[in-house]
Amino acid sequence: MEGGGRVKMEEGRRISSGSVPADKKNEGVTALVVVACIIAATGGLIFGYDNGISGGVTSMDPFLRKFFPDIYKKMQLPPDSHTNAYCKFDSQILTTFTSSLFIAGLLATFVASHVTRAYGRKPSIFLGGVSVLIGAALNGGAVNVAMLIVGRIMLGIGIGFADQAVPLYLSEMAPRQMRGTLNMGFQLFVTVGASFASLTNYGTAKIHVWGWRLSLGLAFVPGLILTLGSMWLPETPNSLIQTQGIEQAKNMLQRIRGTSSIEDELQDLIEATQTSKMVKHPFRSIMQRKYRAYLVMVVAIPMFQQLTGINAVAFYAPLLFRTIGFKSNASLMSVALIGVVGLVATILSMVVVDKYGRRFLFLQGGLQMLISQIIIAVILGYKFESSGDGSISKGYAYLVVVLICIYVVGFAWSWGPLGWLVPSNKGGGRVNMEEGRRISSGSVPADKKYEGVTALVVGACIVAATGGLVFGYNNGISGGVTSMDPFLSKFFPDINRKMQLPPDAHTNAYCKFDSQILTTFTSSLFIAGLLATFMASHVTRAYGRKPSIFVGGVSVLMGAALNGGAVNVAMLIVGRIMLGIGIGFADQAVPLYLSEMAPRQMRGALNMGFQLFASVGFLFANLTNYGTAKIHVWGWRLSLGLAFVPGLILTLGSMWLPETPNSLIQTQGIEQAKDMLQKIRGKFSIEDELQDLIVATQNSKMETRPFQSIMQRKYRSYLVMVVAIPMFQQLTGINAVAFYAPVLFRTIGFKSNASLMSAVLIGMVGLVSTILSMVVVDKYGRRFLFLQGGLQMFISQ
């Protein structure tokens, strides 16, 4: 919770040992506080359930047989088959399924941090719940690995938002004397979720064929509780002071404390808020020597919480038990036992945390985990040896289960709940608790509140940026499709015959995909896109950004329908042309829209949303190809037809999008532009920005020969940049790499699935790099990134 002028730094130091007394008796524990904290803490239920359910599901035979048949075959081998015990579950796709939730959760905290700070705790909790609902629906209804992974990503986003907002909400709602207990409700619900997941898996394992769907789909329940509950939850007084004002915060504080005598606490909150606003460079402040202990703790505690290995144990426990000889039901029952033990230990921790202190529990629990892990490692190493070819007796197997229970107990009463509690209670003076919480999750806040970053701007920019999704998906999907045997055998049989030749057939590796028709299919999108930009430029200028985005979306819908239903090469090429027209209109209008909607200080980051969505689309395309490649005969149709989805988002979204003030000045008038500018900038003054737009519009109207003007010497550097940068962007060869990566990997010897998986890896790397670029672009500047990235590409090529 945010400390204040009366919350001394020395008091903050005592938080870590649990010795802070309740020195103000006016803080009551009302029914509203208890119920609100219980509902909010269901965010932990989501994390625990989704973390616990996946390991059990991946040990179920029907699930493995459907999505991971190679692993299923290994699991059916007898114990004396000399199969490496360490490698039975060795699968990059299974690892992607596992880790996608955590990667998405990590990345989501960057957005969740800003939403939580700028709009309140409730919106973050609501968004987390909605994301979980979507993820649960996708996973429960999954028909291929791609759907599974996308579902896990949505669950990860939901968990990222919930993990960011819920501990903060609990700390801010709870009175001082119960802050430890109520904040640990989050970890309690994590443990309840994990226990419920284990029991669910044990039950659904007996439902053959579709039991795993029930396990994954039941994540919908905690997601629904969190979503509906967040609509009822009261906002915290801390958040209300920041977003609405002191009066609203005062009323809420009286409500949740059950007394009108809340002046001391209210004054602390006001002083803390005013102090935090006065700090121009919060990160420079917390680097000072006097705050170093706090900085170390809020970074180190969450980091070491992860390094305890609890997520690996939570996820892989069923797989470990199957590996050491338990049958499917027995392994799931063992995991359920671990969940119950962890739940009891968490409840015990809630009872003793404010009595014995944080430090004691950290040290005791950490030592307990360390010793149990060492003994487990010695047993497995001794019985399986380094080769993994050994076997383990039932006695040793049961001993491993007991040791893991001891490990989980150690985590559940120490690093589990305290890893959330301590960072979210650090605070005082100039270093407020929110900063510590964001640092610990890797989410770096801005040095100041961004003027004009309203919900409307964020929503509009996200919808518009799906134009990048269209580009990324269609750029990434085609290369994978052209490496699929059913697609080649239907439309390009000559190439398919070359691909079936043995490696020693002396076929020129450079010419396996040598076909003018295939080249036409490939290039028609880019040629159509280039030509479409000439028309799109006029439409965007004369009629506005929205019409161009709408035309782009409709063209993509038509192209996706033609390609998905193609019966000959002509339909394929016409479909690609329509897609190219759609991309040409979107590429012309969307970056311009983003630049004009974004406030100056966030223009770099929001404009790069287009590239971010392009990277997301590219990654999704490769994941889709990997999944549909397993659907013989018609899988390629699904890959090409799914371009309909981003096209539909763009088309429907463009109907809702507000027009930009720049466009309104040109097409409707100053009053309409002023109203829109006020709408998208919120409560901030817009006079200076409006005047700039008016002057710029008047100057542009005075230019009767714009092309003659930009040839003048004073504009030459600008002209060179706006021509040269897009040209050199194309000359980097990125489109060739994006399109032909699967083809290249097949040419150099990878099988179809391996080549598609390699393309997926490239997409994931590109997505992470784009997000990193959005974070640093306004800090390090465009020139540095151009030079560094260009040199990196040049050397690697």
Image (spheres, grey):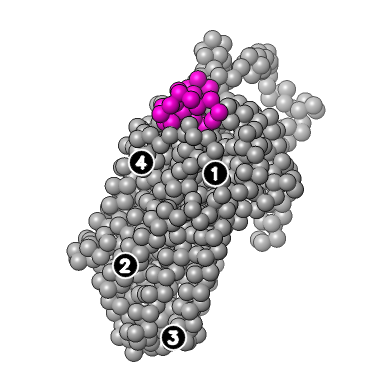
747 or 764, which is in the foreground?
Answer: 764
265 or 768, which is in the foreground?
Answer: 265
Q: Secondary structure at mark 3?
A: helix
Q: Earlier in the sequence, mark 4 or mark 1?
A: 1
Circle 1: residue type? Pro
Query: Is label 1 or label 3 in front?
Result: 1
Circle 4: residue type? Ile
Q: Secondary structure at mark 2?
A: helix
Query: Is label 2 or label 1 in front?
Result: 1
Residue identified by numbered label 1: 21
Q: Earlier in the sequence, mark 2 or mark 3?
A: 2
> How far is mark 2 from mark 4, CA to CA?
26 Å
> How far is mark 1 from mark 3, CA to CA?
52 Å
> How far is mark 2 from mark 1, CA to CA?
37 Å
227 or 696, which is in the foreground?
Answer: 227
What label sits on residue 337 in the rendered view? 2
Residue identified by numbered label 4: 39
Q: Earlier in the sequence, mark 2 or mark 1?
A: 1
> How far is mark 4 from mark 1, CA to CA?
27 Å
Q: Which residues are magenta?
A: 236-265
> How far is mark 2 from mark 3, CA to CA?
25 Å
Circle 3: residue type? Phe
